[in-house]
Amino acid sequence: MTVSTWAAVVLLSSLTVALSHEEGGGPSFGYTPGTPDGPENWGKLSPAYKACNEGKAQSPIDIVTASAIPNPNLDTLSRVYVPCNATLHNNGKDIVMTFERDGEPVMPGSINITTADGTVKVFRFKMVHWHVPAEHSINGKRFPLELHLVHADDHGDKAVVGILYKIGKPDPFYDQLTEKLRELKETPTVAAGMVELKSLQKRTGSYFRYMGSLTTPPCTENVVWNILGKGREMSQEQFELITAPLPHQDNRPPQPLNGRIVAFYNPPNSTISHYTYM
């Protein structure tokens, strides 16, 4: 086995471990409603997945802007992401991007999360994945695509930043991935090289905050969700590059709110803005 082949094996192994951990290491699941492994049956596939059917704080949700409660104790989402070697992977259900150095997973940045009581917690940037169409909706409107920036703290708790996209102007972030996404249609794992992540930390000011869950099995709860209050645009070509490797859509249907509060943060002295282009 050559050195390059060995490195690829190590990289793929570490990526598989990361994906397996994210999905709980349980049985495969699907997104097609009405099928044995469809979203309504995830909780039946494994005891480890029971939260998918029995949980009371599940994600995604429909965010009703008129019901979102302003919370002055929250603060801006302070994020710092650095360039990092990345790998794109098509696991047959979702497109995922993870980060590594010398074959070992790394976390190329962090986010400071201010909780409802004013406490600040630090979560480290773990991975990126996409859902088509978007999983969260705004006032019943579903966007073409949603990007999830997944972060974790030292205890395994997670904080996710969700960005909703409409079709429009090209997003420079995807320009650096064009050829790699084309390759992903032919092979399940593509080394993307050094990826500039700074544009993903672009501040939009406002955001919606609620406590939810992972949107894939095991549907673990106590996830801090932060849906940016202003979406982004991507070109039709970029959208097609992201969606082409997948055989079908990969979005979980909206889950009941069950009395949860959706908070809204807007920077002081700024005009309230959330999805004004809809």
Image (spheres, rainbow, N blue to C red):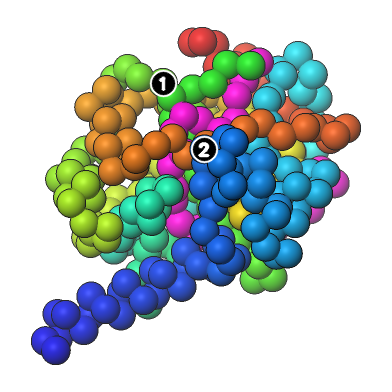
Give neighbour class at mark 2: few <14, some 14-19, many 20+ (Cα, 10 Å). Answer: some
Q: What's under tag 1, amino acid-wise?
A: Lys
Whether residue 103 is situated above or below residue 235 in the rendered picture: below
Which of the numbered marks, if any, corresponds to residue 142?
none
Q: Depth check: 246 or 227 in front?
A: 246
Q: How many marks?
A: 2
The residue most toward the bottom is: 1
**Residue at image mark 2:** 32
> Which element type, helix, strand or loop, lies under badge 2?
loop
Q: Residue at x 69, y 24 (%)?
A: 63
The mark closer to the camera, 2 or 1, is 2
The residue stretch that appears in magenta: 114-139
The residue pinned by badge 1 equals 166
Query: In screen coordinates, is 36 left or right of 257?
Result: left
Residue 225 showing in the rendered view: no
| Residue 190 at least partly seen | yes
Residue 120 on the magenta span: yes
Question: Dividing the picture into quarters, in which one does residue 171 lie?
Answer: top left
Q: CA distance from mark 2 to mark 1?
A: 23 Å
At x 34%, y 40%, the residue is 247
Query: Seen in the image, is 27 located left or right of residue 179?
Result: right
Q: Secondary structure at mark 1?
A: strand
Q: Dividing the image into 4 quarters, which one contains the N terminus?
A: bottom left
Residue 120, image x and y in percent? Answer: 72, 54
56 shown above or below 66: below
Q: Position of residue 237 (x, y in %)?
A: 22, 27
Residue type, mark 2 in image: Thr
Q: Earlier in the sequence, mark 2 or mark 1?
A: 2
Whether 276 is drawn above or below 146: the answer is above
**Residue 116 sits in quarter:** top right
